[in-house]
Image (cartoon, grey):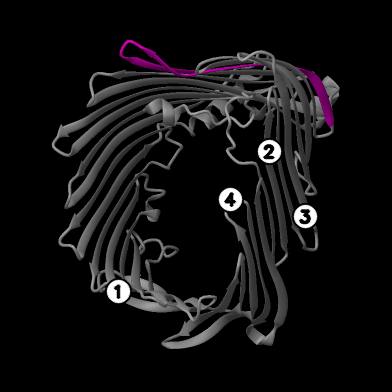
Amino acid sequence: MIANTLYAQEDQDSLFVFVERYKLNKYSSNFTKQLNTFMLTNKLDFLFKHENYFIEVNENFNSTFIKTADKSIRDDQQMRLKTGINLTPAIDIGVMGKSLLLSDSRRIDINSTSVTEIQLFSTYKSGSFFVTPSIGYQKNRQVGETDQGNVLGLESVMESYHLYDLDLYAFLKLNDENISRRKNFNRDIRAAVTNKFNDYVNNTIAFQLIQVRKDFYFLADSITSNEFNVNNNIQSRTETNYIVRDKLNYYGLLKNLDFNLITTFFWRSIDRDTRYKSLSINSPSIFDTRIEELKFDIETNFIYKSEALDFGLKTSYSERDEKHLTKKLEGANPVFFEQRVNNESQKNNFTNRVFLSFYSILDISDKDKVSLNFFHNKLRYDTPSLLNIDDRDELLSILRINYTRIINPFFSGFMNLEGNLNRMVYLNSKRSSNNYLNRVLKLNTGGIYSGSRITSYNSFEVSANYTVYDYEEINPNYKSFSFRQYSFSDSTVVHLSNRIKFKFSGYVKFAEQGEFRWSSFSMKPTRYLEEKLFLPQLVLSYNRFSFTSGLRFFSLKTFNFDKEIKLIDSYYSSSGPLSEIKYFIQDRVELNITGWYEFIKYKNDRKSNSTNLFIDINWFF
């Protein structure tokens, strides 16, 4: 049903107290230290109910510290506290407080923001219908400016209402923030009607309106500042979205075959308005703009399922028309207005897209299975302005074939073959030097062994990537190239006893890049890479604890070519001990601490050391 997917309630600031979004109270903490970057995240979701009283706390804190010559610190905290009582089985009253803090040591336009808000609300519920009006006060600080004022809100939802053969869904959210010189609002209206003709056919029509306005401060230029006596100007961004969607489901169109048809109309507008505009500024930048976008999508899906064969076919066609408009300003110089109109009109564009995908899974026997996946996408991008030279056609096709065979109860093998074709064509001669055709071919084969004490996954892959430019003979800056890679990966676990096991994971990659000529299918190598990663580990389990100790080795070598001789260009290696501790109580506690110390070597014998640490804690209570 379309209402359950497109119109599900996901608003983080919802006032509904009876919609329990958190089945479990949870506290989680994550700390990461890698190279010169430190990151800390704390999150708390708590909901408590006792008879007619309830309290809910949600807190999210993120901090990032980058240790460089210019130290960078960014903190972001969001906290919400909501509590109330049940006056009657149908009516609740309560209060909600919200706090948002943002601090950034970098010199950016908005490096410090804070919002403090408190609201009184009441909820009326009857069956699946809820309505919650609210009123409150907000204090908002941005770029050194402090605003305050009232906040009004209204939320209502009707989860499911059955009327004759129709199922109805509706959702409404209105929120207004009138804070001094700024005004923000949010409008979210959703509705869906499902008509179930019989057990095999149903149709859903859905509508959605979303309108959001946000006012932002930005530093005013000297002319505007002197004329209006302000330090910061205000820009309003208002985005309006209308979505109408129809979905027809037909189950059992033919035996084992289902079908659905989805049609979507989408209209969006974005208005940007500057509060203080000085006519003394002789520039096209004083004019505000508006973006209008109209989009149409139609999609069909066929799904077939039987004992031996499953397949799906999806097709879609979409068109999108985007226009960039300039708003007039009374008294402004018409010459600059025409300049802004011309500049914005260059951004106008029209696109259409054709999409086709197909998958099938065929059980040849009890031991053999073949799957086929095909993807095709064609995009046409047109710009009406003669000054815009980005008109282009794009084509992407991907074909993947997989074969799996169960050789015996312990071992199964697989083989994957994939081919990609990507074509880019610019229609304007000034950009046509970028026209290219990219071909990618991959072959991957391997096996999975699962015994009583040993589990192992091994794979070998070879891939070739060829990119050929159409006019490389004319433009020497564009050279066709190839990229070939060979890799082997292994992941093995050996259970030495009930409590001790040995784990190994790693890979080896060899890659070669070079100038390429498709006509003779010849390559002149220019660069060669060797990459290796090995992680041998010994794991000891005791009750709810797991202790891991091992080694980590990573190396990357790059080579350049002097004729056919490889000369090393760069070298990086990292090696050192690795440890991990895990503690686990099902549905209660999860603790994972992983760290390694690395000795780093570079070319020319340059060395350094680094500590890496990862801590994850999840507590369900």
Residue 384, image quadrant? top left
Which of label 4 and label 3 is nearer to you? Answer: 4
Whether 149 is among the magenta residues is yes
Q: The disc labelled 4 sits on which kind of residue? A: Asp
| Mark sitting on residue 201 | none
* Segment colored magenta: 145-170
> Which sits earlier in the primary sequence, circle 1 or circle 3?
3
| Residue 528 is at least partly visible in this image | no
| Residue topped by disc 2 | 46
Which tag is nearer the camera, tag 1 or tag 4?
A: 4
Estimate the spatial distance between the alpha carbons at disc 4 and disc 3, rounded to whole Å: 37 Å
Callout 1 amino acid: Phe
Q: CA distance from mark 2 to mark 4?
A: 15 Å
Q: Report, in whole angstroms, how far the alpha carbon at label 1 lies from the one at label 4.
A: 34 Å
Instruction: Find disc 1 in the rendering and name its residue.
Output: 411
Q: Residue at x 38, y 27 (%)?
A: 2
Q: Secondary structure at mark 2?
A: strand
Q: Of the numbered discs in the image, which one, if any, rests on residue 72? A: 3
